[in-house]
Amino acid sequence: MGFNPLDEKGLPLDQQILEWDEANIEPFDRRDVHPYTRTRVILMNGIEVEGVLFKHQMARHCDNMDVRRQLAITRRVEQQQQKMVNWLIPGTQTNLEVTLGFEQVAVDLTAWLAKTEPSAHVKAALDFALLEDFDHLYRYSNLYMMDENRDPAEIIGDDLTEVFPGRPTAAEHRHPIDTVFEPAPADADLLSKLHILTIVAAEQQTMNLYMNIGNRPVDMLGRGLYLEIAQVEEEHVTQYESLIPPTASWFERALLHEYNECWLYYACMQSEPDERIRRWWQFHLDCEIAHLHGAVDLMRKFGDKDPMAILPSELPEPLMIFQSNKEYVRDVLAEQESWTINREKIVEADDKPGTFDQYQSWVNVGAIPSEEVIAVNPREYRLEVLGPVAHA
Ligand SMILES: [Fe+2]
Ligand SMILES: [Fe+2]
Ligand SMILES: [Fe+2]
Ligand SMILES: [Fe+2]
């Protein structure tokens, strides 16, 4: 049985703004939250941040006062949603613990999108970057163990997501001209468009996070590791946003943003074991349904296409976005660890472009923080749930 957000009324816009006390939500308990509840929170925070930034950009490109006012109204709600979601993270979680959660999102979200992606082109991009965020989780886990003397499994769980080397972070530094893919076609499957929007938002929020908290470690090694990985997240945002069909109108993009928010909150609701948080997912879904109706109206009035021709009669089945992908990650790693990119083509190690060596010769001179963090750790951290993996 499918769910069609267009058949629902949602929550009227004038009931969406809450009083401070209600919006200032109680955080979850860092000790007993399910790791995938944490990843849902991280993902939906990234989705809301993208919703806000997109509407700012759209308003700056728009000369119609009615549209600009309408954008201001729903954007204020997106802002409130962003805080309500992000404020679920407790102050007792350290920056590195937040970071481990972000890289767990990058691993398990990317793997799930890749597994369910209809386009071979988009799937290839997802599989490619999956191995890089997987490696980030390993590097940060080792930093966390050294700096905070705790077990990363307390955050990511002890059997959901494995931790060991992926494509080594040092080998992820590609020349910028080798980070831009061909876009998906304008008539790509709706599911591909939702997947691209989702991964762009998630990677963008990781990029934003490291831009802001990368300077919080006291020691030079920690600061260096954030610096290095933050530059890879810039590559990831570049590669994923390059997949977005570039010819869609602002109105079509706005419609897809709201539809994606409906789709993801519906998925969060379906899979959330925490009853209190599940009720908030429902609240956000009800807000998004009203935003979606608003976007349909705007597109009917000002857009170049019939919104109904773009949206399906029911939501593509999202169900369990966060689930364990241990075998999948191992399979992709066994095949693609040494792969890189030449212009817009993913290539095997033998076909590395000259630009790869050129860029590497600029950055990987002297100590490389992502290598250093393993070398100086007296007890290398790994979490090999399915058994030991041979050393790279
Ligand atoms: Fe939203
Ligand atoms: Fe990452
Ligand atoms: Fe990433
Ligand atoms: Fe929205």
Image: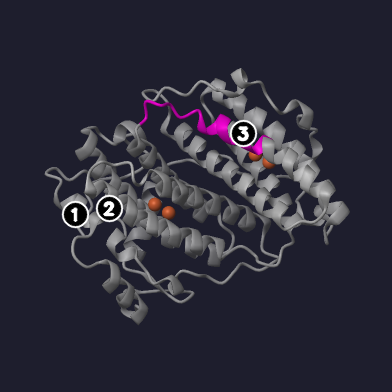
Name the residue beneath numbered marker 1. 372
Which residues lie in the magenta part? 77-93
Tell me residue 343's x, y (percent): 46, 77
Q: Given this view, does label 1 or label 2 mark the residue nearer the observer?
A: 2
Corner quadrant of residue 186: bottom right
Query: Total of numbered circles in the picture?
Result: 3
Instruction: Name the side, left or right, on which 116 lies relative to 16.
Output: left
Q: Nearer the viewer, residue 27 or 34?
A: 27
In the image, ligand 1 is in what quadrant? Answer: top right
Sort mark 2 into few (<14), some (14-19) or many (20+) by Cα contacts within 10 Å.
Answer: many
SS of the residue under disc 3:
helix
For badge 1, the amino acid type reads Glu
Name the residue beneath numbered marker 2. 224
Task: Kindly identify the residue that appears in the image at 75 percent across and 51 percent down.
Answer: 312
Which quadrant of the figure contains the C terminus? Answer: bottom left
For badge 2, the amino acid type reads Gly
Kindly report the distance in space between the C-alpha atoms of the residues bearing marks 1 and 2: 10 Å
Which quadrant of the figure contains the N terminus? Answer: top right
Task: Kindly identify the residue that appears in the image at 11 percent across and 44 percent down.
Answer: 378
Q: Residue 82 magenta-drawn?
A: yes
Tell me residue 143's x, y (percent): 24, 43
